Amino acid sequence: MSEYQYLSSCEGGSASAAVRGVPKRADGIQIKCRTYGVTTIPAGTEVGTVFPLVNVNVDNKGYKSPCVKVEFLSNILTDTATATLNFQVLRQCDGQLTPVPASGIWTFSRTVATDAEANSFGFAFCDCDNCNCGCCNYSVVATVVGAATTGTVTVNNSTLIATVVESADC
């Protein structure tokens, strides 16, 4: 599993964020992004193994009806590998003990092993069901599904972008 650590608070923590106010542009839009380098999924990884890829914190205090557009981008490299991975965005806001699914599932599948192959992989969705509940952490995880992996799969440059706007819907 990846050595990635989740961030636990909005930059500087919720107390200092409350003092500073919501870090948003003059037009009310807040944009946060984060990139994480490399996550390697080794050969023989069992079905159900979850790999955290990247996360970003947003502070939606001060928004009446926050709507968050979440975009994920990555490069997936396979080296004589077969694998099926499900990607999902999880959300954990102030007061929640565990993250909950915020999105549907996107699937990457490599069913034929070929010598070193690279693929761009990404998705976007709008999360307009989050309450005005302060700091929310959005994270993307990849879960091995189907059969155990063969060869090595590497998820490079996982990038997560969250754009918060004041809107009843996206």
Image (cartoon, rainbow, N blue to C red):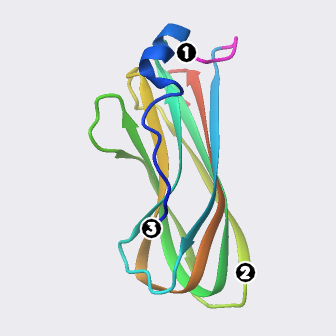
The answer to whether residue 97 is magenta is: no
On screen, residue 58 versus residue 25, left or right, reads left
Residue sitting nearer the eye, 165 or 170: 165
Write down the residue under mark 1. Answer: 22
User: Contact, CB < 8 Å: mark 3 with mark 2?
Assistant: no
Q: CA distance from mark 3 to mark 2?
A: 22 Å
Q: Residue at the location (56% across, 31% down)?
A: 170
Q: Residue at the location (45% across, 86% down)?
A: 44
Q: Which mark is residue 120?
A: none
Q: Secondary structure at mark 1?
A: loop
Q: Which residues are magenta?
A: 22-27
Q: Secondary structure at mark 2?
A: strand
Task: Count residues near mark 1 (Cα–Cα under 10 Å), then give few for <14, some for 14-19, many for 20+.
Answer: some
Counting from the top left corner in percent of width and height, residue 136 is at: 44, 32
Write down the residue under mark 3. Answer: 1
Quarter in which the N terminus is drawn: bottom left
